[in-house]
Image (cartoon, rainbow, N blue to C red):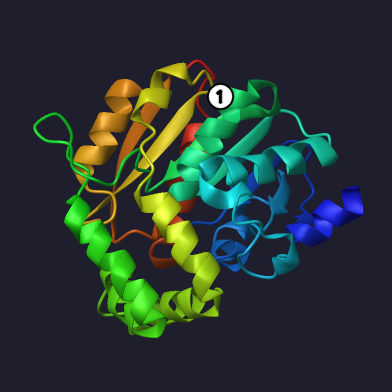
Amino acid sequence: MTQKILRRNNIKVFGQGTQTMMFAHGFGCDQNMWRFVTPAFEKDYKIILFDYVGSGQSDISAYSYERYSDLNGYVQDVLDICEELALTNVIFVGHSVSSMIGLLSSIQAPNYFNRLILVGPSPCYINDLPNYYGGFERKDIEDLLDIMDKNYIGWASFLAPMVMQNQDRPELSEELEASFCSTDPVVGSRFAEVTFYSDNRSDLPNASVPALILQCSEDMVAPTEVGHYLHRHLPKSTLRLMTATGHCPHLSHPQETIDLIKEYLSEPHTT
C-alpha cells in the first residue's frame, strides 16, 4: 500500500531533520513550485513534497470524479500520506486552496499536525455581503469556469498574469501558465470548480492547530480583507502581511516567505 500511495501522489522525502515539513501545492500547480523555499529548511527538517491526484506527476489513473468532487478527496490524499509515512508533529505548509485542505486535515486528524503555514489562504472566494468579502461575485466564478470549459489554453494565458502579478517578471506568469496547461483540462476544470465554490468559513472555529496566515498585498485571489477575516475567526492564528504582491509569494518573493516562516517557527508554540 505504501508504494501505491508513494506512486499515486509522487511523494518525495528528503532533508536532514527529524521534524516533518509537508509542502502542499495550490490549484493548477505541482510540488516543483516549492523549489525556491525548501532548500532553506532541508538542513533542519524532513521535507515531504507531493502532487495531488490529477496534478503534476501523480498517477492520473487514480483520479476519481466522485472522490475529488469536493475538498475532502484532497484532504484524504494528505491524511493517506500522513498515515502511510507514520507522520506526527507535522508542519503543514499549504498554498492557496491547500491552506484549507491542510486546515480540514488538521480538524479531522489533529494528532498528525504541529502547526499550519497558510500561504495566500481563503475560506471562501465568493462575496457574501455585507458580512464577507471574498473578492469574487458568483457570476465572476461562473464566467471563469465557462471560459475554462470552452478554451482551457486561453483561460490559462488570461488568468496566470492576474494571479501572479509582478508584471516586471513575465517568466513567473509564463511558468504558472505552463503549469496550468500541463494539467489535464477535465481534472483542472473540476479542481477549479471545487476550489472556487468551496466555503469553509464554518469550519474555522473547529481548528485546534496553531496557524500562520501569510497574506500577500495586492492579491486578487485572496484580498487583504480575507486574511483579516481568517485571523479573526481562526483560533490560535497569527497574521503576517507581506510586502510580496500577487498570489504566489513562494515563487515571486521566496526569501520573504522563508523569513516569515522561520520567524514563526522560532516563536513559542502557544501563539
Q: Secondary structure at mark 1?
A: helix
Q: Relative to residue 139, is residue 242 depicted above or below?
A: above
Look at label 1 and name its amino acid.
Answer: Ile
User: Residue at 48% of width from left, 58% of height from top?
Assistant: 191
Residue 46 visible to an observer of this rendering: yes
Residue 136 visible to an observer of this rendering: no
User: Residue at 19% of width from left, 39% of height from top?
Assistant: 225
Q: Is residue 79 left or right of residue 205?
A: right
Q: Is residue 22 left or right of residue 3?
A: left
User: Residue at 77% of width from left, 59% of height from top?
Assistant: 8
The image quarter containing residue 244 is bottom left
What residue is pinned by disc 1? 107
Residue 77 in the image: state x and y as whole percent. Answer: 68, 46
Q: Residues within 10 Å of mark 1 (few under 14, many from 20)?
A: some
Residue 176 in the image: state x and y as whole percent. Answer: 43, 74
- In the rendered picture of this protein, how many numbered marks are placed on residues? 1
Residue 93 in the image: state x and y as whole percent. Answer: 55, 44
Q: Return the residue nearer the eye: 234 or 44.
A: 234
User: Residue at 31% of width from left, 28% of height from top?
Assistant: 231
